[in-house]
Amino acid sequence: MASAQVKPAAAGPAGTVAVGVHAIPARGIENFYQLNDRVYSGAAPEGDAGFAALQARGIKTIITVDGAAPDVVAARKYGLRYVHLPIGYDGISSNQAVRLVKAAETLPGPVFVHCHHGLHRGPAGAAVICQGIDGWSPDQAVAWLQLAGTATNYAGLYASVRQFHAPSPAELRTVPADFPEQSRISPLADVMVQIDQRFDHLKLIRKADFKAPPGTPDLDPRNEALQLEELFKELLRNPVTEKRGKEFRELLQQAEQASGVLEAQLKPAVVDRTKAEAGFRRLSESCNACHQKQRN
């Protein structure tokens, strides 16, 4: 992308957050930060208290990058507009990044950007927006992620922020302005395809003694287990899961826990292969149990 014509940020030294970024105590919103006059970041609003806190701050538009459906009705009750532009834990696509910038720039503000906990995807989305409309440097954006508590093992989110180039006015004009209150949530089959792909990656990693397989150095063992865990978490919050009943939810919870255990076992610089093998087998057994009872 071409460089945007943006105003310079109130900058500190490289590697420090932009001047003015600060935390805000508020009922109903965890990890609540003001980034500049136009952009706020935090966790999903909890109940009336959360939406009332946003209203009290004068916020007009909520941009959620979470995978779950937003509470549009509650937002409207407090005169707030929702925009749903979901992103993954593996990073922000260039198209979605430009849509985030245009939404924040053109919709009534200030805007509040959130994911579920306000720690990972939300701060990344807010960072891209501030790079696009407030002139933040990549260093400032990364420093913001660190301040917000974005885990460094979400390598895709950090890469998206580091590599982002603010869109030009001409590029922004090509982006449709019909931002949805609720985007289509991936149906069960789509999520399961992603889960299968991550599990296939872990099979290759296992064959390589729980290291990056030869010829595929980008397959980071711990990250693959982490991405799998997040897919299970996202699916547990998907309305389709409730419709499948209690047994399906319990099987998903077991798979989520197993992938979390494996992720922890793959964290050390020198992986204990015996423990990792046990973790992989537990995950495999969990997936197989679900497939046998639910896949058809």
Image: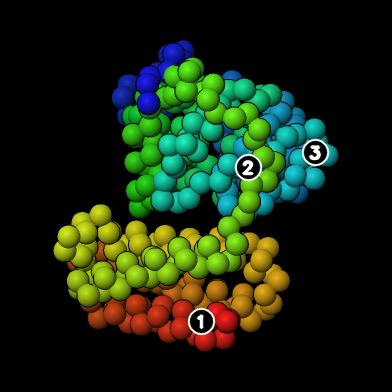
- Label whose residue precedes the other's in the sequence (3 or 1): 3
Question: Which element type, helix, strand or loop, lies under badge 2?
Answer: strand
Instruction: Examine the image and state in which quarter residue 74 appears.
Output: top right
Residue 7 seen from this side: yes
Q: CA distance from mark 2 to mark 3?
A: 14 Å
The structure residue drawn at horizontal position 55% and vertical position 60%, both measured from the top left corner, is 234
Q: Amino acid at mark 2?
A: His
Q: Which residue is mark 3?
A: 76
Q: Is residue 92 left or right of residue 175?
A: left
Contact? badges 1 and 2 (CB < 8 Å): no
Q: Quadrant of the N terminus?
A: top left
Relative to the observer, which residue lies in front, 18 or 61?
61
Q: Which residue is mark 2?
A: 84
Q: Is residue 286 left or right of residue 179?
A: left
Q: Quadrant of the C terminus?
A: bottom right
Q: Name the disc covering residue 291, or none.
A: 1
Q: Residues within 10 Å of mark 1 (few under 14, many from 20)?
A: few
